[in-house]
Amino acid sequence: MRRALIQILLFVALALPIAAIALSGFGVSSFAAACQRGLVWGLESVGWVLIPQIGLGLAIASLALERVSRRVAGLATERLPRWIDPAVESALLLGLLGTISGMVRGFVGVTPDEIQPGPLVNSLGAALRSSGVGFGIALVGVWLKQEPLTEGEEVRATTYQGGSA
């Protein structure tokens, strides 16, 4: 019963966005155009590091969703894949790389007399959003790596006094 409920909830969670798109009257071409506009907006607001960040974010989020649903359903969780550690570190580093590239884009080739507040604020905003996206992805990955203690480990963790006898 519990497993069936989880499957129904996951199906609804996946079907809602598709149903919303279908009911909104978007045709295939208008949906593709909206996706393209969204990607362009994302690239302008976060920077080029958005592309790999999307890939890392989707991979980590899908793994987190799978693990949460397995725990709720009372199923055993499998070992984390080996790619999770480099993915979390890469998300952080991509965020920092986006910050640096956004700041360089805002300041390169501009003398102090030529600085315009509007373009500078846009570049610095993209730089900070890039870090925010990277840190957000990494936070989910760090949460994902925290395994709950089994009963035996929990008892050992609470009774360990440290030191040697």
Image (spheres, rainbow, N blue to C red):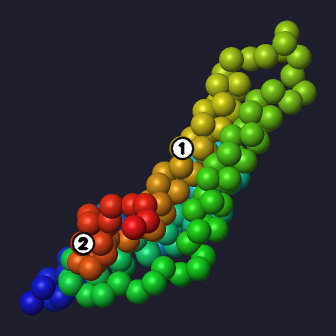
Q: Earlier in the sequence, mark 2 or mark 1?
A: 1
Q: Report if residue 156 is visible in the image.
A: yes
Q: Position of residue 118 (x, y in %)?
A: 66, 22
Can you tell which quarter of the image residue 145 is in?
A: bottom left
Task: Name the outermost residue toward the front.
Answer: 165
Of the pair 48 and 32, the residue shown nearer to us: 48
Residue occupying the point 86% across, 30% down: 108
Q: Mark 2: give few (<14), some (14-19) or many (20+) Cα within 10 Å.
A: few
Mark 2 vs mark 1: in front: 2
Residue occupying the point 32% across, 65% down: 160
Total tally of numbered discs in the picture: 2
The C terminus sits in image quarter: bottom left
Left of 133 or right of it: where is 51?
right
Q: Secondary structure at mark 1?
A: helix
The N terminus sits in image quarter: bottom left
Can you tell which quarter of the image residue 144 is in?
A: bottom left
Report, in whole angstroms, how far the alpha carbon at label 2 lies from the one at label 1.
Answer: 38 Å
What is the number of the mark on residue 132?
1
Q: Secondary structure at mark 2?
A: helix
Residue occupying the point 43% across, 65% down: 164
Amino acid at the residue labelled 1? Gly
**Disc 2 designates what residue?**
155
Residue occupying the point 68% across, 53% down: 93
Q: Mark 1: give few (<14), some (14-19) or many (20+) Cα within 10 Å.
A: some
Can you tell which quarter of the image residue 38 is in?
A: bottom right
Judge whether 152 appears above or below 52 on screen: below
